[in-house]
Amino acid sequence: SLDAAVITLNFTWFILAWALFGIARELVGPNAGDKAGFFTFVLFGLHPLTTMLSHNYLVELPFVTFVCASIYSLWLLNKTQKYKWSVISGIFIFLGLLTKVTFVAFVLPSFIFLVYCNIRKLSVGTTFVLFIPVIFFAILAGLYYFYNLRQILEMTILLSSRSMAQLYGFGNPFDIHVMLEYLRNVFTIPTMLVASFFAVVMFISRVIRSIKRDDKVGDNFQAQALINVLFLWLIIPFILATFGEIKDPRYLYPCLVPVFVFAGAMVSRFPMNKLGIIFVTLAYMLPFSGYLYSNSLLSENLANQFRSIFKISPVLALNAEARPDHRNWNIDKIVGEVAQKLDATQARKTVLFLGGNRYY
Protein backbone atom coordinates (compact mmCIF):
# COMPACT_ATOMS: atom_id res chain seq x y z
CA SER A 1 0.00 0.00 0.00
CA LEU A 2 0.99 3.63 -0.32
CA ASP A 3 1.16 4.01 3.47
CA ALA A 4 3.57 1.06 3.72
CA ALA A 5 5.78 2.66 1.05
CA VAL A 6 5.87 6.02 2.86
CA ILE A 7 6.56 4.41 6.25
CA THR A 8 9.39 2.32 4.77
CA LEU A 9 11.05 5.31 3.14
CA ASN A 10 10.72 7.43 6.28
CA PHE A 11 12.23 4.66 8.39
CA THR A 12 15.29 4.49 6.14
CA TRP A 13 16.10 8.12 6.96
CA PHE A 14 16.80 7.24 10.59
CA ILE A 15 19.28 4.54 9.54
CA LEU A 16 20.83 6.88 6.98
CA ALA A 17 21.32 9.62 9.57
CA TRP A 18 22.96 7.12 11.95
CA ALA A 19 25.30 5.79 9.26
CA LEU A 20 26.24 9.07 7.56
CA PHE A 21 26.86 10.94 10.82
CA GLY A 22 28.84 7.95 12.09
CA ILE A 23 31.06 7.66 9.02
CA ALA A 24 31.74 11.41 8.99
CA ARG A 25 32.53 11.34 12.72
CA GLU A 26 34.96 8.45 12.24
CA LEU A 27 36.72 10.28 9.41
CA VAL A 28 37.02 13.70 11.03
CA GLY A 29 37.19 12.84 14.73
CA PRO A 30 34.95 13.62 17.71
CA ASN A 31 35.65 17.35 17.79
CA ALA A 32 34.23 18.23 14.36
CA GLY A 33 32.50 14.92 13.62
CA ASP A 34 28.92 16.05 14.19
CA LYS A 35 29.52 19.15 12.10
CA ALA A 36 30.93 16.99 9.28
CA GLY A 37 27.95 14.66 9.59
CA PHE A 38 25.54 17.56 9.31
CA PHE A 39 27.14 18.97 6.15
CA THR A 40 27.34 15.45 4.66
CA PHE A 41 23.69 14.77 5.41
CA VAL A 42 22.57 18.11 3.92
CA LEU A 43 24.46 17.48 0.67
CA PHE A 44 22.99 14.00 0.43
CA GLY A 45 19.50 15.40 1.03
CA LEU A 46 19.91 18.16 -1.57
CA HIS A 47 20.88 15.76 -4.35
CA PRO A 48 18.03 15.55 -6.91
CA LEU A 49 18.11 11.74 -6.87
CA THR A 50 17.50 11.76 -3.12
CA THR A 51 14.50 14.02 -3.61
CA MET A 52 13.17 11.96 -6.50
CA LEU A 53 13.59 8.66 -4.69
CA SER A 54 11.91 10.11 -1.60
CA HIS A 55 8.89 10.96 -3.75
CA ASN A 56 8.97 7.80 -5.81
CA TYR A 57 8.84 4.34 -4.24
CA LEU A 58 11.86 2.59 -5.76
CA VAL A 59 14.38 0.35 -4.00
CA GLU A 60 17.30 2.77 -4.36
CA LEU A 61 16.69 4.75 -1.16
CA PRO A 62 16.46 1.64 1.09
CA PHE A 63 19.30 0.20 -0.99
CA VAL A 64 21.68 3.11 -0.38
CA THR A 65 20.65 2.98 3.29
CA PHE A 66 21.71 -0.65 3.62
CA VAL A 67 24.96 0.04 1.76
CA CYS A 68 25.83 2.92 4.13
CA ALA A 69 24.80 1.00 7.24
CA SER A 70 26.72 -2.12 6.17
CA ILE A 71 29.96 -0.28 5.52
CA TYR A 72 29.68 1.78 8.71
CA SER A 73 28.98 -1.28 10.89
CA LEU A 74 31.80 -3.22 9.17
CA TRP A 75 34.13 -0.33 9.95
CA LEU A 76 33.05 -0.39 13.62
CA LEU A 77 33.66 -4.15 13.64
CA ASN A 78 37.17 -3.57 12.30
CA LYS A 79 37.79 -0.80 14.83
CA THR A 80 36.39 -2.43 17.99
CA GLN A 81 36.52 -6.19 17.23
CA LYS A 82 33.23 -6.50 19.11
CA TYR A 83 30.95 -9.37 18.19
CA LYS A 84 27.81 -7.22 18.27
CA TRP A 85 29.01 -5.27 15.23
CA SER A 86 29.52 -8.53 13.38
CA VAL A 87 25.87 -9.40 14.01
CA ILE A 88 24.64 -5.89 13.10
CA SER A 89 26.70 -5.70 9.92
CA GLY A 90 25.54 -9.20 9.00
CA ILE A 91 21.90 -8.13 9.32
CA PHE A 92 22.43 -5.05 7.14
CA ILE A 93 24.33 -7.10 4.55
CA PHE A 94 21.49 -9.65 4.56
CA LEU A 95 18.93 -6.89 3.95
CA GLY A 96 21.07 -5.25 1.29
CA LEU A 97 21.63 -8.50 -0.60
CA LEU A 98 17.90 -9.18 -0.67
CA THR A 99 17.07 -5.60 -1.70
CA LYS A 100 19.13 -5.45 -4.89
CA VAL A 101 21.65 -7.85 -6.41
CA THR A 102 24.16 -5.09 -7.25
CA PHE A 103 24.74 -4.66 -3.49
CA VAL A 104 27.84 -6.85 -3.90
CA ALA A 105 29.51 -4.33 -6.22
CA PHE A 106 29.19 -1.53 -3.66
CA VAL A 107 30.13 -3.38 -0.45
CA LEU A 108 32.38 -6.33 -1.36
CA PRO A 109 35.57 -4.31 -2.16
CA SER A 110 35.45 -2.50 1.21
CA PHE A 111 34.53 -5.76 2.96
CA ILE A 112 37.59 -7.55 1.53
CA PHE A 113 39.84 -4.66 2.55
CA LEU A 114 38.52 -4.65 6.13
CA VAL A 115 38.92 -8.43 6.41
CA TYR A 116 42.52 -7.99 5.27
CA CYS A 117 43.06 -5.27 7.90
CA ASN A 118 41.72 -7.58 10.61
CA ILE A 119 43.94 -10.45 9.51
CA ARG A 120 46.97 -8.15 9.74
CA LYS A 121 45.98 -7.03 13.26
CA LEU A 122 44.80 -10.41 14.55
CA SER A 123 45.13 -13.70 12.66
CA VAL A 124 43.24 -15.68 10.04
CA GLY A 125 41.53 -17.87 12.65
CA THR A 126 40.54 -15.02 14.96
CA THR A 127 39.26 -12.96 12.03
CA PHE A 128 37.19 -15.90 10.78
CA VAL A 129 35.57 -16.36 14.19
CA LEU A 130 34.90 -12.63 14.44
CA PHE A 131 33.19 -12.60 11.03
CA ILE A 132 31.07 -15.74 11.55
CA PRO A 133 27.76 -13.79 11.92
CA VAL A 134 28.55 -11.78 8.76
CA ILE A 135 29.30 -14.99 6.85
CA PHE A 136 26.16 -16.67 8.20
CA PHE A 137 23.82 -13.86 7.10
CA ALA A 138 25.59 -13.55 3.72
CA ILE A 139 25.13 -17.29 3.09
CA LEU A 140 21.51 -17.08 4.21
CA ALA A 141 20.80 -14.36 1.64
CA GLY A 142 23.12 -16.05 -0.85
CA LEU A 143 20.78 -19.03 -1.31
CA TYR A 144 18.85 -16.92 -3.80
CA TYR A 145 22.10 -15.84 -5.45
CA PHE A 146 23.37 -19.39 -5.95
CA TYR A 147 20.11 -20.36 -7.65
CA ASN A 148 20.33 -17.40 -10.09
CA LEU A 149 24.11 -17.07 -10.24
CA ARG A 150 24.62 -16.47 -13.96
CA GLN A 151 22.01 -13.72 -14.26
CA ILE A 152 23.15 -12.08 -11.03
CA LEU A 153 26.81 -11.99 -12.08
CA GLU A 154 25.77 -10.23 -15.27
CA MET A 155 23.61 -7.71 -13.40
CA THR A 156 26.35 -7.06 -10.81
CA ILE A 157 28.97 -6.37 -13.46
CA LEU A 158 26.62 -4.12 -15.43
CA LEU A 159 24.95 -2.62 -12.31
CA SER A 160 21.74 -3.62 -14.09
CA SER A 161 20.56 -5.99 -16.80
CA ARG A 162 21.62 -5.95 -20.46
CA SER A 163 17.99 -6.03 -21.55
CA MET A 164 17.29 -2.95 -19.42
CA ALA A 165 20.18 -1.14 -21.06
CA GLN A 166 18.86 -2.05 -24.51
CA LEU A 167 15.37 -0.90 -23.51
CA TYR A 168 16.68 2.50 -22.41
CA GLY A 169 18.79 2.80 -25.57
CA PHE A 170 21.99 4.18 -24.02
CA GLY A 171 24.08 3.31 -27.07
CA ASN A 172 27.52 1.75 -27.29
CA PRO A 173 28.89 1.63 -23.71
CA PHE A 174 32.48 2.18 -24.89
CA ASP A 175 31.65 5.12 -27.13
CA ILE A 176 33.61 8.09 -25.78
CA HIS A 177 30.71 10.48 -26.43
CA VAL A 178 28.29 8.20 -24.54
CA MET A 179 30.67 8.01 -21.57
CA LEU A 180 31.28 11.77 -21.53
CA GLU A 181 27.55 12.45 -21.65
CA TYR A 182 27.07 10.04 -18.77
CA LEU A 183 29.78 11.73 -16.68
CA ARG A 184 28.24 15.11 -17.49
CA ASN A 185 24.86 13.91 -16.23
CA VAL A 186 26.46 12.67 -13.00
CA PHE A 187 28.75 15.56 -12.12
CA THR A 188 27.20 18.74 -13.55
CA ILE A 189 24.28 18.68 -11.13
CA PRO A 190 24.81 21.63 -8.71
CA THR A 191 24.95 19.32 -5.67
CA MET A 192 27.71 17.21 -7.22
CA LEU A 193 29.63 20.30 -8.33
CA VAL A 194 29.67 21.57 -4.75
CA ALA A 195 30.44 18.15 -3.24
CA SER A 196 33.19 17.40 -5.77
CA PHE A 197 34.81 20.79 -5.21
CA PHE A 198 35.03 20.35 -1.43
CA ALA A 199 36.15 16.71 -1.80
CA VAL A 200 39.03 17.73 -4.09
CA VAL A 201 40.00 20.53 -1.69
CA MET A 202 40.02 18.00 1.17
CA PHE A 203 42.47 15.72 -0.63
CA ILE A 204 44.71 18.64 -1.60
CA SER A 205 44.80 19.88 2.00
CA ARG A 206 45.48 16.33 3.20
CA VAL A 207 48.46 16.01 0.87
CA ILE A 208 49.81 19.35 2.11
CA ARG A 209 49.39 18.28 5.76
CA SER A 210 51.10 14.95 5.10
CA ILE A 211 54.07 16.77 3.54
CA LYS A 212 54.27 19.05 6.57
CA ARG A 213 53.56 16.03 8.84
CA ASP A 214 50.92 17.89 10.80
CA ASP A 215 48.79 14.78 11.50
CA LYS A 216 49.39 12.45 14.41
CA VAL A 217 50.61 9.03 13.30
CA GLY A 218 47.83 7.01 14.99
CA ASP A 219 45.01 9.29 13.87
CA ASN A 220 46.46 9.48 10.37
CA PHE A 221 46.62 5.67 10.11
CA GLN A 222 42.96 5.25 11.15
CA ALA A 223 41.80 8.06 8.86
CA GLN A 224 43.79 6.65 5.94
CA ALA A 225 42.23 3.21 6.44
CA LEU A 226 38.74 4.72 6.38
CA ILE A 227 39.63 6.79 3.31
CA ASN A 228 40.67 3.55 1.60
CA VAL A 229 37.30 2.01 2.50
CA LEU A 230 35.43 5.03 1.13
CA PHE A 231 37.59 5.12 -1.98
CA LEU A 232 36.89 1.45 -2.76
CA TRP A 233 33.19 2.09 -2.13
CA LEU A 234 33.34 4.89 -4.71
CA ILE A 235 35.77 3.78 -7.41
CA ILE A 236 34.83 0.15 -8.16
CA PRO A 237 31.10 0.78 -8.88
CA PHE A 238 32.04 4.01 -10.65
CA ILE A 239 34.30 2.13 -13.08
CA LEU A 240 31.65 -0.55 -13.61
CA ALA A 241 29.04 2.11 -14.32
CA THR A 242 31.24 4.23 -16.59
CA PHE A 243 32.20 1.30 -18.80
CA GLY A 244 28.96 -0.65 -18.31
CA GLU A 245 26.02 -0.81 -20.67
CA ILE A 246 23.49 1.11 -18.59
CA LYS A 247 24.19 4.81 -18.23
CA ASP A 248 21.58 5.91 -15.69
CA PRO A 249 23.02 7.86 -12.68
CA ARG A 250 20.38 6.20 -10.48
CA TYR A 251 22.29 2.92 -10.62
CA LEU A 252 25.45 4.70 -9.49
CA TYR A 253 23.66 6.50 -6.66
CA PRO A 254 25.05 4.57 -3.62
CA CYS A 255 28.69 5.16 -4.58
CA LEU A 256 28.22 8.94 -4.62
CA VAL A 257 27.91 8.93 -0.82
CA PRO A 258 31.70 8.95 -0.19
CA VAL A 259 31.95 12.18 -2.21
CA PHE A 260 29.41 13.77 0.17
CA VAL A 261 31.37 12.43 3.17
CA PHE A 262 34.66 13.88 1.90
CA ALA A 263 32.95 17.20 1.19
CA GLY A 264 31.30 17.30 4.62
CA ALA A 265 34.66 16.56 6.24
CA MET A 266 36.27 19.45 4.39
CA VAL A 267 33.48 21.93 5.17
CA SER A 268 33.67 21.04 8.87
CA ARG A 269 37.31 22.13 8.87
CA PHE A 270 36.64 25.45 7.18
CA PRO A 271 37.55 28.49 9.30
CA MET A 272 34.31 29.75 10.81
CA ASN A 273 35.09 33.42 10.30
CA LYS A 274 32.80 35.69 8.30
CA LEU A 275 34.48 34.90 4.97
CA GLY A 276 34.31 31.15 5.56
CA ILE A 277 30.65 31.25 6.61
CA ILE A 278 29.69 33.34 3.56
CA PHE A 279 31.58 31.02 1.21
CA VAL A 280 30.04 27.82 2.60
CA THR A 281 26.56 29.38 2.65
CA LEU A 282 26.81 30.46 -0.98
CA ALA A 283 28.12 27.04 -2.00
CA TYR A 284 25.24 25.23 -0.30
CA MET A 285 22.73 27.65 -1.83
CA LEU A 286 23.65 26.45 -5.34
CA PRO A 287 21.57 23.24 -5.15
CA PHE A 288 19.00 24.64 -2.72
CA SER A 289 16.72 26.16 -5.35
CA GLY A 290 16.46 22.79 -7.09
CA TYR A 291 15.46 21.19 -3.80
CA LEU A 292 12.74 23.82 -3.23
CA TYR A 293 11.51 23.48 -6.81
CA SER A 294 11.28 19.67 -6.76
CA ASN A 295 9.35 19.84 -3.48
CA SER A 296 6.84 22.33 -4.95
CA LEU A 297 8.11 25.12 -2.69
CA LEU A 298 9.42 27.29 -5.53
CA SER A 299 8.08 27.99 -9.02
CA GLU A 300 10.14 27.09 -12.05
CA ASN A 301 10.45 30.79 -12.95
CA LEU A 302 11.81 31.73 -9.51
CA ALA A 303 14.10 28.70 -9.50
CA ASN A 304 15.61 29.75 -12.82
CA GLN A 305 15.98 33.36 -11.65
CA PHE A 306 17.84 32.08 -8.61
CA ARG A 307 20.09 29.94 -10.79
CA SER A 308 20.83 32.83 -13.13
CA ILE A 309 22.52 34.62 -10.21
CA PHE A 310 25.06 31.78 -10.07
CA LYS A 311 25.22 31.39 -13.89
CA ILE A 312 23.71 27.89 -13.81
CA SER A 313 21.94 26.74 -16.97
CA PRO A 314 18.22 26.18 -16.29
CA VAL A 315 18.12 23.15 -18.61
CA LEU A 316 21.18 21.65 -16.95
CA ALA A 317 19.82 22.20 -13.48
CA LEU A 318 16.20 21.11 -13.95
CA ASN A 319 16.62 17.93 -15.99
CA ALA A 320 17.34 15.89 -12.86
CA GLU A 321 14.47 17.34 -10.85
CA ALA A 322 10.72 16.78 -10.98
CA ARG A 323 7.78 17.73 -8.83
CA PRO A 324 5.55 15.21 -7.05
CA ASP A 325 2.50 14.22 -9.08
CA HIS A 326 -0.57 14.56 -6.85
CA ARG A 327 -3.13 13.37 -9.40
CA ASN A 328 -5.46 10.55 -8.45
CA TRP A 329 -4.55 7.67 -10.73
CA ASN A 330 -7.61 5.60 -9.66
CA ILE A 331 -5.48 2.48 -9.34
CA ASP A 332 -8.05 0.54 -7.29
CA LYS A 333 -10.78 1.24 -9.85
CA ILE A 334 -8.59 0.23 -12.80
CA VAL A 335 -7.38 -2.99 -11.17
CA GLY A 336 -10.95 -3.85 -10.14
CA GLU A 337 -12.21 -3.45 -13.70
CA VAL A 338 -9.35 -5.61 -15.02
CA ALA A 339 -10.18 -8.31 -12.47
CA GLN A 340 -13.85 -8.34 -13.51
CA LYS A 341 -12.93 -8.89 -17.15
CA LEU A 342 -10.52 -11.75 -16.51
CA ASP A 343 -11.42 -15.03 -18.17
CA ALA A 344 -11.39 -17.00 -14.91
CA THR A 345 -13.65 -18.24 -12.18
CA GLN A 346 -14.65 -15.72 -9.54
CA ALA A 347 -12.47 -17.42 -6.92
CA ARG A 348 -9.37 -16.94 -9.08
CA LYS A 349 -9.96 -13.36 -10.14
CA THR A 350 -6.98 -12.03 -8.22
CA VAL A 351 -4.81 -9.35 -9.79
CA LEU A 352 -1.25 -8.60 -8.76
CA PHE A 353 -0.66 -4.99 -9.77
CA LEU A 354 2.99 -4.08 -10.35
CA GLY A 355 3.02 -0.31 -10.56
CA GLY A 356 5.56 1.65 -12.52
CA ASN A 357 7.53 4.67 -11.38
CA ARG A 358 5.03 7.13 -9.93
CA TYR A 359 5.48 10.12 -7.65
CA TYR A 360 3.28 10.45 -4.61
Image: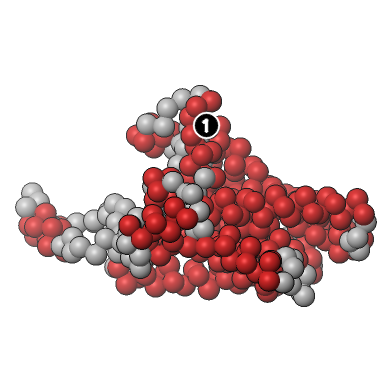
Left or right, 336 with respect to 2, comes to left
User: Is residue 180 shown to the viewer in this render?
Assistant: yes
Which quarter shows the C terminus?
bottom left
- Above or below: residue 104 compared with residue 153: below
- Above or below: residue 101 compared with residue 129: above
Residue plotted at (49% across, 58% down)? 287
- Above or below: residue 216 compared with residue 120: below
Residue 73 location, quadrant: bottom right
Residue plotted at (53% across, 38% down)? 183
List x then y, in percent, for residue 299: 32, 62
Residue at image mark 1 = 179
Secondary structure, mark 1, is helix
User: Is residue 92 shown to the viewer in this render?
Assistant: no
List x then y, in percent, for residue 59: 43, 56
Residue plotted at (86% across, 59% down)? 220
List x then y, in percent, for residue 278: 62, 67
Query: How many numbered discs, if any?
Result: 1
Residue plotted at (51% across, 39% down)? 184
Residue 44 location, quadrant: bottom right
Q: What kind of colouring is applied to the model shown?
A: secondary structure
Dot 1 amino acid type: Met
Closest to the observer: 329 or 305? 305
List x then y, in percent, for residue 85: 70, 69
Left or right, 245 with respect to 205, comes to left
